[in-house]
Image: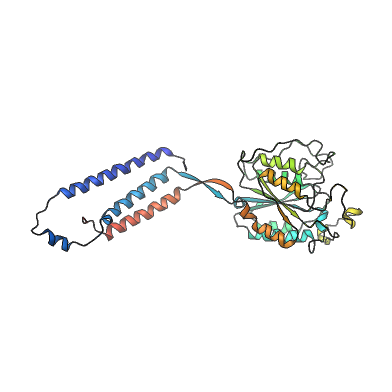
């Protein structure tokens, strides 16, 4: 426990002095001799009460004064609180592979329904933001408590080409930085290329050989526990592998340096079915070619229609989050419903002056009641 005004605790020294004065008064009373013809008669007439009761009002009064003095010093205690109680950034993959029908009716519809349920289940004070990503990442809804804005954005999701997981992580960090002054924006020092889509996060440039951005930095993740965790978290849902921009591991290192935890969810089966999206989900786009027309293979090195679980696990380990896997809609709902229990590790300093002052009032009332209820005859 820490105190904002610790000097006021010196007033507690008055309490031992009050106890000494109380003891001195009791001693003086005992020395007074009153002549009575029969002491036995007096004892028979006096009510029988436990000796401690006559001291209870004074003890309660001292406890109340101690609470008030401690409250005046503005004590603060460090408590573990659910980080989801602050803000949750949902980063959703809307790449064309989300049209896969291996999850009924398709991955995107199942994800939309599960995310809506997750948003609905959160406390009204929890701010939720929405980042969507395909060929680039963009903040669709800034962290807010207005659920209608989130529902509208979730219902209006449309698919696009590409999967930029790393850019989505950086965009989520930027969203957190807007509401938490202790979190620095993600600035990897990579300027977006002239051909980048509007709203693209730095690091969305064409990948260099090996999958990384040509100009991406090589950040080093901090050691575990060296950076305090921010109360805000990122929940990243994807069904594929990173295809362009900064690599997920480089982005995870940047997030870790800012204390932002990422909880990745690998969605979908390892055997994608044909891609079928509704006209609204396609948004008027047409995905031609073998990748979106019905072929599922991706490349010889990596099937981009299957979640890259190994990379997602590394992202979680780097940032201090937890990796989850969901192969169908039911599992995804359970993962999102269970998520708040996996993020109760954030520590915050909470002032408890009001609680102590309230306790002091209760003790004063009890002291008054005890003084009226029990007489102060000697035992």
The image quadrant of residue 96 is: bottom right
Q: Nearer the viewer, residue 162 or 354?
A: 162
Residue 144's x, y, as percent?
65, 52
Q: Is residue 3 left or right of residue 196?
A: left
Residue at image point 79% right, 64% down: 105
* Looking at the image, residue 2 lies above or below residue 365: above
Which residue occupies the extreme right position in the image?
A: 289
Residue 123's x, y, as percent?
60, 57
Residue at image point 27% right, 53% down: 55
Residue 300 in view, yes or no: yes
Q: Is residue 340 left or right of residue 214?
A: left
Which residue occupies the extreme left position in the image?
A: 37
Colour mode? Answer: rainbow
Number of dots carrying numbers:
0
Split into 4 quadrants, where in the image is the C terminus?
bottom left
Residue 286 in view, yes or no: no
* Looking at the image, residue 218 lies above or below residue 262: above
* Looking at the image, residue 212 lies above or below residue 157: above
Residue 204's x, y, as percent?
79, 42
Q: Nearer the viewer, residue 15 or 123?
A: 15
Residue 341's x, y, as percent?
61, 55
């Amino acid at each position: 426990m820490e105190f904002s005004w610790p000097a006021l605790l010196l007033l507690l020294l008055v309490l031992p002095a009050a106890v000494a004065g109380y003891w001195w008064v009791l001693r003086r009373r005992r020395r007074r001799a009153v002549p009575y013809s029969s002491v036995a008669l007096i004892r028979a007439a006096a009510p029988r009460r436990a000796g401690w009761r006559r001291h209870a009002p004074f003890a309660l009064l001292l406890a109340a004064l101690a609470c008030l003095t401690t409250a005046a010093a503005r004590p603060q205690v460090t408590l573990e609180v659910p980080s989801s109680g602050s803000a949750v950034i949902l980063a959703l993959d809307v790449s064309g592979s989300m049209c896969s029908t291996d999850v009924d009716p398709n991955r995107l519809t199942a994800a939309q329904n599960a995310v809506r349920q997750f948003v609905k289940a959160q406390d009204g004070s929890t701010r939720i933001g929405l980042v969507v990503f395909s060929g680039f990442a963009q903040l669709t809804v800034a962290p807010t408590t207005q659920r209608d804005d989130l529902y509208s954005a979730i219902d209006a999701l449309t698919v696009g080409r590409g999967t930029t997981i790393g850019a989505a992580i950086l965009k989520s960090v930027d969203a957190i930085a807007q509401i938490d002054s202790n979190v620095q924006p993600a600035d990897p020092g990579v300027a977006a290329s002239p051909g980048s889509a509007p709203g693209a996060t730095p690091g969305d440039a064409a990948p260099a050989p090996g999958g990384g951005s040509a100009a991406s930095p090589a950040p080093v993740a901090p050691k575990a526990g060296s950076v305090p965790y921010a109360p805000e978290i990122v929940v990243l849902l994807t069904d594929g592998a990173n295809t362009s921009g900064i690599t997920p591991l480089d982005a995870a290192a940047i997030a870790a340096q800012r204390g932002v935890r990422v909880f990745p969810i690998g969605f979908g089966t390892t055997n994608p079915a044909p891609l079928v999206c509704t006209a609204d989900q396609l948004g008027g786009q047409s995905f031609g070619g073998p990748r979106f027309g019905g072929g599922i293979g991706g490349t010889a090195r990596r099937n981009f229609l299957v979640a890259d679980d190994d990379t997602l696990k590394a992202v979680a380990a780097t940032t201090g989050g937890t990796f989850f896997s969901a192969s169908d809609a039911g599992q995804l709902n359970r993962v999102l419903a269970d998520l708040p229990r996996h993020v109760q590790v954030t520590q915050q300093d909470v002032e408890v002056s009001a609680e102590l002052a309230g306790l002091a009032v209760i003790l004063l009332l009890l002291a008054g009641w005890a003084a009226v209820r029990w007489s102060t005859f000697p035992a």
